[in-house]
Image: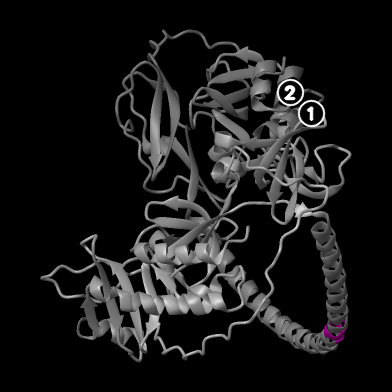
Amino acid sequence: MRRRTKNSMISLALVGALTFSVVVPFGGRQVYADPADDPETIRVTIDTDTPSAVENDEKQNNEKNVIDASDLETVMAGAAVAVNRYLESDFSYDTSELFERIHIRPSLPTPTETQPVEPVTNPEVVVPPVEEPPVEEPPVPVETEPVIETQPETLPEPTPAPHVGYKGMAISAPPDTYVNIRTAPSTGGKKVGKIYANAVAEVLEEVPGDGGQWFLITSGTVTGYVKAEYFVIGEAALAMKDSIATRVGTINTYNLRLRSQPDLKAPVLTLLSNGTTTVIAGEEGEFYKIELDEGYFGYLHRDYVDVEYQYGHAISLDEERLAAEKAYQEQLEREAEEARLAEEARLAEEARIAEEKRKAEEARRAEEERKAAEESRIAEESRKAAEAAEAARLAAEAEQAEIDRKTPVQVSAKYIGPQKYVGEVVNIEEVEITVYYKDGHTAINPANWQCSLIGIPLAKGEIVFPVAYGPLETVFVVNSIERPAEPAPTEPAPTQPAPPPISEADQLRLQICDYAKQFIGNPYILGGSDLLHGTDCSGFVMRVFQQFGISTTRTSRSQAAAGTPIAVDLKTLRPGDLLFYDTNGTITHVALYIGNGQIVHAANPQMGICIWDAFYRTPCKAVTFLP
């Protein structure tokens, strides 16, 4: 900061008195001088002594006297006394002492002639109780020698530059991180400091020098020469000065509310006291935005925040050296403190580990005892649970066995009567009904089976009789023919010769069927091919034929494709042929035909390997692997 004279300081105080409210101690009271509605007059408000600011607000109407500009002289005399006492004291650049004597605050609105003076309140400000400040004796003036500023002998007396004030602002824009400041406009001049990028300096003079134009600048505590090409000046500097500045806000009232959003109704995060400073991150409406933590923001009402623009400035070599030494010393102290804390932490950690080991040993012993007791309890509970589970299992098996004994899963029917002729009827006793139950036993001709064609005269041909037993259904076929005419009496026919012996091919077919029927009652297992311990339908067929050296492949669909197709007709089917059944057009099951309209197959998990009626559902295909 450049030194100002006492006269300029007095002028600043007086100008401020016309722009802001000036508060000075006056006769044990606080005196406020505010601009009035009439520009020719100034209203002066005198507060009487009160024990607290809250009581002062409540009694504001009765305890304030408004006087005209005719009495302003008395008030300003008090302000002048305070200023003069300050100026006669030890003069310094610090203005905090002055603002302890003359407090500048935003002007309060002046009430009209017909309105009473209301207490000034704002939802953003929380007024704390105020104690009367102690009366301080004015400082005794001290004789001081005037401070004389000197310039290095090598620097010429500067002449006014064409860039005075803001026009004299220069912003550093070096090609690297900083520019050297020298005692002469030459790279041979002695280095006296550095100015970093985006730092601000005042141009005192522009002179020709080594390699072009040079500026004589002052910035911070450093005055010297720099190359002009490394600086932005004039309108360009003014255009970018706000972008390089750090805006610092200072709270100018008591207990200002910090809100979570830029809204007077937003939640209050905390209260900030008078004089608190913070960096302003932005503006939103009537609020300044400040960053409380990384990515965490709050909002302050702008009426109660004084804003100052701060810029970077040059640093002398001595300042840089002292800063480096200070940083180094702080680093040593920090490392020593970290070492001390680390040692304390190590000792504490060792103590903690020892204590944890002791507690862990105690816990281990307690846990072993608990586990032993728990294992004993679990063993006893397991024994009791096993006994209960076994009893429940036996009871469930008995119950299921009874259910299986009573649950039919398949029914088959066949005609066992004589040859029927057209017009004759089939009687109940000529039909054999076999019911297969879930537990594996069968019942022949049980009661309550039904057939709608029993007792109805037969037409010519194969007649399919539907049979129902509860929810189960099957069919049997009766072939009805025309009754032959009675032959005329003839001589007795000679004795017919014995039928020819069965061929080897037919014997092979019967052997295959007899071998397959040996495994009736064995279990069904999907994907299996073990005739004793479990197989599915195609595995059953494959293993039976494999016993006789015939390969049928593994799955029902491949077996249907590998065999020789034959008609699905009881007249042409022979024992040992294979019948296939489909689901929605896809072959899903295969069975071995054993004659008399029956099949042997691995039916399902409930029935296992069993004998069923060949037409329990309509076969979709028949093939043979036999001659």
Q: Work out whether residue 239 or residue 202 is closer to the camera in this orientation and state it.
A: 202
> What SS does tag 2 mark?
loop
Q: Is residue 403 left or right of residue 184?
A: left
User: Would residue 424 be visible to someone looking at this image?
Assistant: yes
Q: Which mark is residue 552?
A: 2
Residue closest to the eye, 383 or 461: 383
- Looking at the image, can residue 520 be seen? no
Q: Which residues are magenta?
A: 350-354
- What quarter of the picture does the C terminus occupy? top right
Place residue 63 in its image quadrant: bottom left
Q: Earlier in the sequence, mark 2 or mark 1?
A: 1
Residue type for callout 2: Thr
Percent coordinates x, y for residue 1 in the rendering: 63, 58
Q: Position of residue 80 (x, y in %)?
A: 42, 75
Cα–Cα gap, marks 2 and 1:
8 Å
Residue 595 position by quadrant: top right
Q: Label the magenta part by its dominant secondary structure.
A: helix
Q: Nearer the viewer, mark 2 or mark 1?
A: 2
Q: Is residue 144 above or below residue 302?
A: below
The crowding category of the residue bearing disc 1, from other C-alpha atoms within 10 Å (few below 14, some 14 to 19, many at least 20), is few
Residue holding disc 1: 546
The residue at 67%/82% (across/down) is 381
Q: Residue 202's x, y, as percent?
A: 64, 46
Say which amino acid is labelled 1: Gln
